[in-house]
Image (spheres, rainbow, N blue to C red):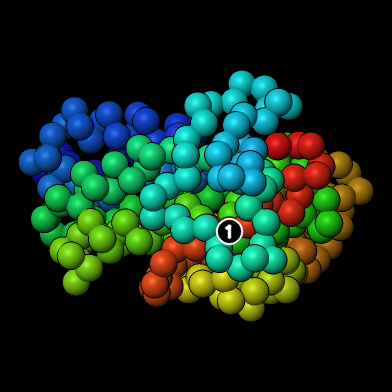
């Protein structure tokens, strides 16, 4: 009852290690009773990828984690016009280990909720408007979501009907969401709107007066769920980050 009736949360920055250790600690039998896991989803850290595919830390990236090789399920593009040299995401191999362990789950149904930061949608530079901020952490590529979708299928019932669902919870300012919705879907996301809420009233007196006088689309935040569409064929790695020239990685 304890594991099947509760939602287990892993908030803040974690990089998968404590999640894997917790699952290993409770054991495969108790893992089978899990029905809901809620995980904060931050963009992976970044490393420099060389022309030969090897990877090294970025010198300006203070406190960089261990550098991990490209995942074996992530295939480099064969397009000769696509350079593989540049700044790429550094995906922890323990992420796959989490899904391999959860794949043994044979309970009534397991849902993983990945909570994204506000205005962050993998594959879409939402809210960036031509520049980067928050030291590039808001630029989230599709490599990790694509791998997670592949592992979700591969590690549960041999790719047939399985008891695991992955939902990415997102939010964005209403005008940006309306403007980018088609592009979000073109990136391979199915969208389900789940709610709409007002932006908290500002403390500034002038802004507060405007807030009280009337509502506009800019006053609202849209909340929505994202699900990856089925992965067909190989998972091809995204090219190096186009914003790596900024030096914020």
Which quarter of the figure is the N terminus placed in? top left
User: Which residue: 50% across, 70% down?
Assistant: 189
Q: Is residue 10 visible?
A: no
Q: Position of residue 150 (x, y in %)?
A: 35, 61
Q: Is residue 184 visible?
A: yes
User: Which residue: 29% across, 34% down?
Assistant: 20
Residue 76 located left or right of residue 158: right
Q: Which residue corresponds to mark 1?
A: 238
Q: Position of residue 77 (x, y in %)?
A: 55, 63
Residue 123 located left or right of residue 31: right
Q: Quarter-wise, where is residue 78 in the image?
A: bottom right
User: Which residue: 53% across, 26% down?
Assistant: 65
Residue 118 located left or right of residue 226: right
Q: Position of residue 140 (x, y in %)?
A: 60, 51
Q: Secondary structure at mark 1?
A: loop
User: Which residue: 86% across, 42% down?
Assistant: 204
């Amino acid at each position: 009852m304890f594991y099947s009736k509760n939602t287990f949360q892993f908030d803040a920055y974690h990089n998968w290690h404590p999640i894997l250790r917790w699952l290993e600690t409770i054991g495969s039998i108790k893992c089978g009773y899990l029905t809901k896991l809620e995980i904060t989803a931050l963009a992976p850290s970044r490393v420099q990828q060389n022309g030969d595919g090897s990877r090294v830390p970025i010198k300006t990236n203070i406190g960089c984690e261990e550098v991990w090789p490209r995942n074996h399920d992530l295939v480099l593009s064969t397009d000769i016009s696509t350079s593989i040299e540049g700044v790429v995401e550094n995906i922890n191999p323990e992420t796959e280990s989490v899904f391999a362990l959860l794949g043994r789950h044979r309970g009534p149904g397991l849902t993983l909720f990945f909570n994204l930061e506000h205005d962050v949608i993998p594959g879409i530079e939402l809210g960036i408007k031509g520049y980067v901020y928050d030291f590039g952490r808001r630029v989230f590529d599709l490599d990790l979501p694509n791998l997670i979708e592949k592992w979700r299928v591969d590690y549960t019932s041999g790719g047939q009907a399985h008891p695991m669902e992955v939902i990415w919870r997102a939010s964005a300012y209403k005008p940006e969401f309306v403007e980018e919705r088609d592009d979000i879907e073109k990136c391979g996301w199915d969208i389900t709107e789940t709610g709409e809420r007002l932006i908290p009233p500002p403390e500034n007196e002038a802004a507060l007066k405007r807030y009280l006088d009337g509502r506009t689309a800019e006053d609202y935040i849209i909340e929505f769920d994202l699900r990856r569409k089925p992965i067909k064929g190989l998972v091809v790695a995204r090219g190096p980050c186009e914003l790596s020239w900024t030096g914020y990685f």
